[in-house]
Image (cartoon, helix red, strand yellow):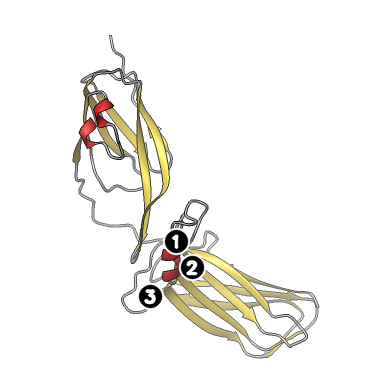
Amino acid sequence: MSVTLDIRLKRANKIYHEGETVAGVIVLVCKEPLQHHGISLNMEGLVNLQLSSKSVGVFEAFYNSVKPIQLISSNVEVAKAGKIPGGKTEIPFEFPLLTKGNKVLYETYHGVFVNIQYTLRCDMKRSLLAKDLSRNCEFIVHCQPQKAKVIPTPVNFTITPGTLQNTRERSLLPKFLIRGHLDATSCVISQPLTGEVVVENSDVPIKSIELQLVRVETCGVLKVCRDAQRSEYQIAEVCCHGLSIPSNVFPGGHCHMETHSIS
């Protein structure tokens, strides 16, 4: 007998915030009346550390020692054993999006190493001669926007041959001095990371300057101190000594550069 099982949420974008109600319907479509042994719906939120092509062999020992962290888990029986009439049947459901105890409801995140996922799973048990039906549906959790303004904390930096890391032959490097600052160390992901760079002096010409952003994934007790992704942005060409070079880099993947005319 042909039968389809589906989960449909009331919100088309499937985005919810903590304290709201995840509501929708379970849709069953069958041509003839269908006998079943109960229909259940489970809502679960998990934090997982996952391996990728970049991390195979690096985090295997750590991965085996870290179990998934359960943020939320709720189960409800939406229909007792019985018979579903032929045609289309919709069974409504509601789940309050609340955590138990002092656990934090993290935002949905699919990264390289860390995966935070919230799902609904519907199971319909059938007789031994018929296969049980199951359906999964992911929904998105967003944190409420912060009402308080983030106070920017500027950071000054200086780059010389002595401050470089992972360099063996420092004596062979040309002498140079680069100063600059970042306007803030914390910023909204939709806003640019701004600052400036000044090449004070250099024994050799500098053809270009690139800014590299390294993403490190952390989530509560799962702290993966390894870069998950690197993004490089060119912020200058043909660098002149003493010239302030502004940078406007968006974490989303693009960079705004100002044009300077030098005569």
For marks 1 and 3, give the CA distance: 15 Å
Q: Secondary structure at mark 2?
A: strand
Query: Where on the picture, by quarter, is residue 175?
Result: top left
- Check whether the beta carbons of the residues at disc 2 and disc 3 lie within 8 A of each other: no
Q: Position of residue 51 (x, y in %)?
A: 49, 59
- The amino acid type, in three-letter code, at marker 2 is Tyr
For marks 2 and 1, give the CA distance: 7 Å
- Check whether the beta carbons of the residues at disc 2 and disc 1 lie within 8 A of each other: yes
Q: Position of residue 72 (x, y in %)?
A: 43, 75
Number of numbered discs overlaid on the protein picture: 3
How would you rate the neighbour count of disc 3 (Cα within 10 Å): few for under 14, some for 14-19, many for 20 or more? some
Res. 108 mark: 1
Query: Where on the picture, by quarter, is residue 3?
Result: bottom right
Figure check: 97 above or below 242: below
- Lateral position of residue 15 relative to residue 87, left or right: left
Q: Nearer the viewer, residue 234 or 125?
A: 234
Residue at x 20%, y 37% (from the top left corner): 157
Query: What residue is disc 2 on?
Result: 118
2 or 1: tag closer to the N-terminus: 1
- Lateral position of residue 142 relative to residue 203, left or right: right
- The amino acid type, in three-letter code, at marker 1 is Thr
Res. 12 mark: none
Q: Is residue 190 visible?
A: no
Q: Nearer the viewer, residue 135 or 211?
A: 211
Query: What residue is disc 3 on?
Result: 99
